[in-house]
Amino acid sequence: MYYSWTEIDLNAFRDNIRLVRAALPQGCKLMVPLKANAYGHGLEAMAKAAHEFGVEWLGLATLREALEIKAYVPEARILVLGPCEPDDAKALFVHRITPIIVDLENAHAMNEASRRLHTRLPVHLKIDTGMGRIGFDAEHTLEDIWKATQLSNLQVEGIMSHFATADEDDIHYAIGQHDRFKRVLKYLKERNVDIPIKHIANSGGFMNIAHCDYDMVRPGILLYGGCPQAGGKVRTDAPGRPLLAWKTNVTFIKEVYTGQCIGYGAAHKAKKHTKIATIEVGYGDGFHRILSGRAHVLIRGMRYPVVGRISMDQTTVDLGLVNDVMVGDEVVLLGRQLGDEITVHELAREMDTIPYEVYTSISARVERRYFFNGEQVHNFVFSNFSLMASSILK
């Protein structure tokens, strides 16, 4: 049976967590963002691994994602990074999931919902310091922020913001965001409000903005072994290493002759006598059509170009005539093979995008295989993994 799969190195995940922790001040907590299927790495396994490796908080985009994680790791502390509705209050309370509050209207609505449940709902206040999305405006709604802290049925345990340009070459805008966040904190402190968990640092902030650690950091792409990338430029100073490799197999090889066409639209015409390999991956797997005629793959440690239009399920590769490639050979789409490597940054460049989109585009039908201490963790049985993880962490 032919299909593409990913191989995810949980030792690398553990080591990346350790590297980030080593750079944090004492007592600073770590949140692992697990949005979008854990950046394409698989939600269940990565949630269990993050919890096992001592991560204090998990960050999700939606309540639906958060509830899914609670089924895997019931004791995990989870922050929903997108807005929640008052109707969500019961699920948040029952499953001990923390929402963000995005404005005073949202605060009043959640406070009332919490009152009806006879509880104080833990929340984090989201401050818009310059991202232009959700959150209290840092410059024009200071009084609203304070009022939200005074509501009797909300327990404001956190306050947060998010950098828009911390991964750019010019970080002046991000520094301005940080200054606005500090002014909000100062305003609250002058009114005797000291919120326990303050956090603003994403991966770019963690690497580039001084003194923004506060009580917790939220590096996403760094923990998955990537590096913040903006403006088409790639940084190479990420402290960790990639977790994920993406592979498939050669399923068919045929000779084609000068002038023969390959793929939909007859878009590629052979310029000479050559061999064409078909490999089992397509845009239905997340190997995007834009990679047609751009990407390369690794087979037996050699690079071969993708030719013709990428189909939903299959892709064609020009082997040339002189090679030992055979049907069944492993093909590396992303990752290392022998002495060469196709990095996520290379693939992102060929897709005119960023590493985040490469990872999150890998579709659900691509099998995720997890490895720890060189052995595959089958079906990610948490109890077995827990024993292995505990032994390696001691």
Image (cartoon, rainbow, N blue to C red):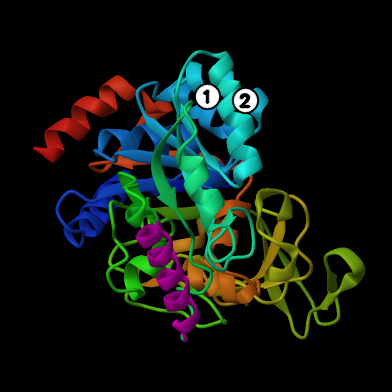
Q: Amino acid at mark 1?
A: Leu
Task: Look at the image and give the residue range highlighted in magenta.
Answer: 170-187
CA distance for labels 2 and 1: 6 Å
Main SS, magenta residues: helix
Percent x, y of residue 312: 77, 52
On screen, 391 above or below 312?
above
On the rendered structure, is 59 left or right of 112? left
For the residue pair 91 and 287, the one nearer the viewer reads as 91
Residue in view at x 53 percent, y 69 percent: 164
Residue 3 visible in the picture: no
Where does residue 299 sit, x and y in percent of width and height?
50, 65
Q: Is residue 172 magenta?
A: yes
Relative height, residue 390 to residue 374 (above, below): above
Q: Which amino acid, mark 2?
A: Asp
Secondary structure of the residue carrying tag 1 is: helix
Q: Are marks 2 and 1 in contact (CB under 8 Å)?
A: yes
Q: Position of residue 329 (x, y in %)?
A: 51, 55
State which quarter of the image contains the N terminus.
top right
Q: Is residue 206 left or right of residue 259?
A: left
Would you identify the image quadrant in which residue 266 lies? bottom right
Q: Give 172 or 166, whichever is nearer the viewer.
A: 172
**Which residue: 50% across, 79% down?**
173
Image quadrant assignment for residue 267? bottom right
248 in the magenta segment: no
**Residue on which disc 2 sits:** 88
Q: Count all numbered tags in the image, as a single digit.
A: 2
- Residue of label 1: 92
Q: The C terminus is located in which quarter?
A: top left
Q: Dot 2: few (<14), some (14–19), or many (≥20) neighbours within 10 Å? A: few
